[in-house]
Image: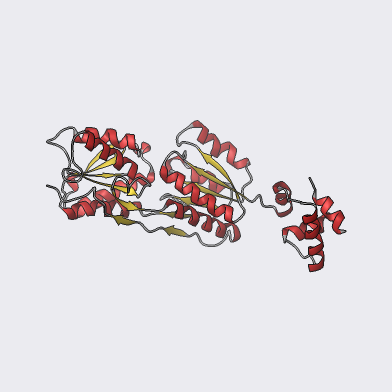
């Protein structure tokens, strides 16, 4: 394999000049640059990332920290981040570790401080763990994705508005007994974004004079979680709600499967709304609040690129659009 020394020797220049010519950093005459690039082509020379890092002070690598990518939202978001970084010739170092684990604590306290990244994208960081504070101390360009973004540029949807719009849709249809599936009784077990969606649900009920009708069923934000919570909610015919809002589409789809197994017709006996516009939402004809995590990934990289080029620029927060998508899982109550 050819080295930068081989390229320099063939072009008749020093290694430093060859490096400047190939990296585009520093002055080199047009004639010298052509000789060096021709020599590199003839020798099939490819710059090693470590050598480039030493020459420029940059690693061309961005660290991405997020929960495990076993849910649709995080998979789509990661795909968007990867697409945008690849277009900029950046590599991605992924740390997908579950919150509240010793491994994650070790990541923030011991691992990340020793890693060299040009920037960091932090997804779904929770305020209780003080993880964002650890990242600030690293003094590297930082962008967060999600509602908690203290001291960093960020991209998110308006979680309060998303749940409020979903609840208002059901209220406008005539529903008065609306349950929320996906909450947690213990605040420490509830993600910051999910807590804000519960706030939006309560806000809409209060505005309609239904604050005392709020009902929150604890459930993980997954299909099995939504299914289990809905089975318990719907088991008592007398206390059954006429509508359910899922904290996300996966919880809403789980509730829909539970209703069908219990012989409850959707939407004539039960209306269901989700949040996300998951890839399976259309298949289940689920009414939902649409967001695009892939576009959020693109936007996160754009914001990070700005922070890397202008570290002292004012922080910027992008709230991406979300809209109500009405399908056939909602209707006026009987």
Residue 144 in the figure: left or right of residue 23: left
Residue sitting nearer the eye, 221 or 160: 221
The x, y position of residue 236, in whole percent, is: 15, 33
- Give the left or right position of residue 299, taking residue 287 as reference: right
In the rendering, at what x and y percent does residue 158 appear? 36, 54
In-front residue for pair 314/305:
305
Q: Is residue 87 above or below residue 248?
A: below
The structure residue drawn at horizontal position 86% and vertical position 55%, both measured from the top left corner, is: 10
What is the x, y in percent for residue 106? 54, 34
**Placement of the N terminus among the 4 image quadrants:** top right
Q: Residue 194: where, in percent of width, then height?
A: 35, 44
Q: Is residue 186 visible?
A: no
Residue 107 position (above or below residue 141) = above
Image position of 80 (left or right of 28)? left
**Along the line of sight, the residue nearer the viewer: 101 or 177:** 177
**Picture layout, residue 222 above or below residue 304:** above
The image quadrant of residue 74 is: top left
The quadrant holding residue 247 is top left
Q: Residue at x 45, y 37 (%)?
A: 99
Residue visible at 52% across and 58% down? 303
């Amino acid at each position: 394999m050819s080295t930068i020394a081989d390229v320099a020797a063939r072009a008749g220049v020093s290694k430093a000049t060859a490096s400047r010519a190939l990296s585009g950093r520093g002055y080199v005459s047009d004639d010298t640059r052509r000789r060096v690039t021709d020599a590199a082509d003839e020798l099939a020379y490819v710059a090693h990332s470590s050598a480039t890092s030493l020459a420029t002070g940059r690693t061309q690598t961005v660290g991405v920290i997020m929960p495990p990518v076993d849910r649709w939202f995080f998979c789509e978001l990661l795909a968007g981040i990867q697409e945008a970084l690849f277009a900029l010739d950046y590599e991605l170092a992924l740390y997908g570790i579950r919150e509240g684990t010793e491994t994650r604590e070790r990541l923030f306290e011991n691992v990340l401080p020793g890693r060299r990244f040009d920037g960091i994208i932090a997804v779904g960081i929770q305020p209780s763990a003080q993880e964002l504070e650890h990242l600030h101390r690293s003094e590297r360009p930082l962008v967060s994705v999600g509602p908690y973004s203290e001291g960093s540029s960020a991209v998110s949807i308006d979680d309060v508005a998303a749940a409020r719009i979903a609840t208002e849709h059901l209220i406008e249809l005539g529903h008065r007994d609306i349950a929320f599936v996906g909450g947690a009784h213990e605040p420490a077990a509830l993600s910051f974004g999910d807590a804000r969606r519960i706030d939006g649900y309560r806000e809409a009920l209060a505005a309609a004079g239904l604050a005392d009708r709020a009902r929150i069923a604890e459930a993980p934000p997954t299909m099995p979680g939504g299914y289990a919570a809905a089975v318990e909610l719907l088991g008592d015919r007398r206390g059954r709600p006429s509508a359910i809002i899922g904290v996300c589409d996966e919880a809403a789809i789980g509730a829909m499967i539970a209703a069908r197994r219990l012989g409850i017709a959707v939407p004539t006996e039960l209306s269901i709304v989700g949040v996300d516009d998951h890839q399976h939402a259309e298949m289940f004809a689920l009414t939902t609040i649409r967001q695009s995590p892939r576009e959020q990934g693109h936007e996160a990289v754009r914001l990070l690129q700005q922070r890397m080029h202008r570290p002292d620029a004012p922080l910027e927060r992008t709230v991406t659009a979300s809209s109500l998508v009405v399908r056939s899982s909602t209707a006026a109550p009987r």
